Amino acid sequence: MTVVSTRFQASDPEQLEQGLSAAVGAVRSGELVLLPTDTVYGVAADAFDPPAVSRLLAAKGRGREMPPPVLISAVPTLDALAIGLPFWVRTLVERYWPGALTLVVREQGSLQWDLGDTRGTVALRMPHDPVALALLERTGPLAVSSANLSGRPAATDADQAEEMLGDQVAVLLDGGPARGDLASTILDCTGDRPRVLRAGALPLEELRTVLAGDGVELEDAGPDRGPRA
């Protein structure tokens, strides 16, 4: 088993505070961090640090054609990062953020980042996990992909995350077992109506019902083309 250099137990308030401080320092230094989310464990980098994002992709064995999602700590950040949001996006955000719903939206053209071959879009999510939110509040937006090597299942606990990526990261925040083994549901929100890119933790029938209240139809899922987080 590959052992990460610095691991902190989030269940211990003192260790959690130490871990958050260490993780913030690592992110600001361009290093990677392993953290729990409300879906699966994630590996994170500063979203505005292109070399760090490149290291994240390399650690997982991925190329620029699979850009990572970006996690945020507050709903207003959506408007700072995205443009041209359809009205029904607000309904989804109000209902499901924080939570296991990732929204692919058109990115602000002035953003100084390079997440990969995004074609002018970004996948955004506000997680419902206290450790993840506490870190995001201190760092700002993080590029976060599921903690796994490409082709292997996403880590659902800290040991699995460490075994796969421990030699690639500076800090591991151990939040215990993940609350679920499904990654987030991903919707493409760049068109006139939402389109499923990946079925995940949120039931699609529930999403259809919520969107129907706005008179919007959810397009059926096609091949899984979503980012992993």
Image (cartoon, rainbow, N blue to C red):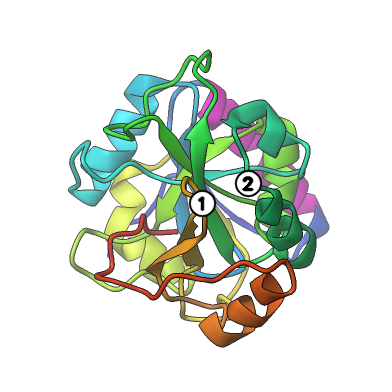
| Vertical side of 57 occupied by 116: above or below | above
| Vertical side of 111 occupied by 44: above or below | below
Q: Secondary structure at mark 2?
A: loop
Q: Compare residues 161 and 185 and report the one nearer the observer.
A: 185
| Vertical side of 160 occupied by 60: above or below | above
Q: Residue at x 45, y 46 (%)?
A: 69
Q: Compare residues 172 and 87 and report the one nearer the observer.
A: 87
Q: Secondary structure at mark 1?
A: loop
| Vertical side of 88 occupied by 29: above or below | above
Q: Residue at x 43, y 70 (%)?
A: 219
Q: Position of residue 141 (x, y in %)?
A: 60, 34
Q: Mostly what secondary structure, the magenta segment? A: helix
Segment tinted magenta in the rendering:
14-28
Q: Residue at x 47, y 56 (%)?
A: 42
- Mark 2 and mark 1 in contact (Cβ < 8 Å)? yes
The three-letter code of the residue at mark 1 reads Asp
Residue neighbourhood size for the residue with mark 2, other residues' Cα within 10 Å, grouped as few (<14), some (14–19), many (≥20):
some
Q: Pick the quarter of the image with the N terminus.
A: bottom left
Residue 24, by quadrant, is: top right
Residue 179 visible: no
Q: Kindly identify which residue carries mark 2.
A: 86
Q: Kindly identify which residue carries mark 1.
A: 192
Membership of 23 in magenta stretch:
yes
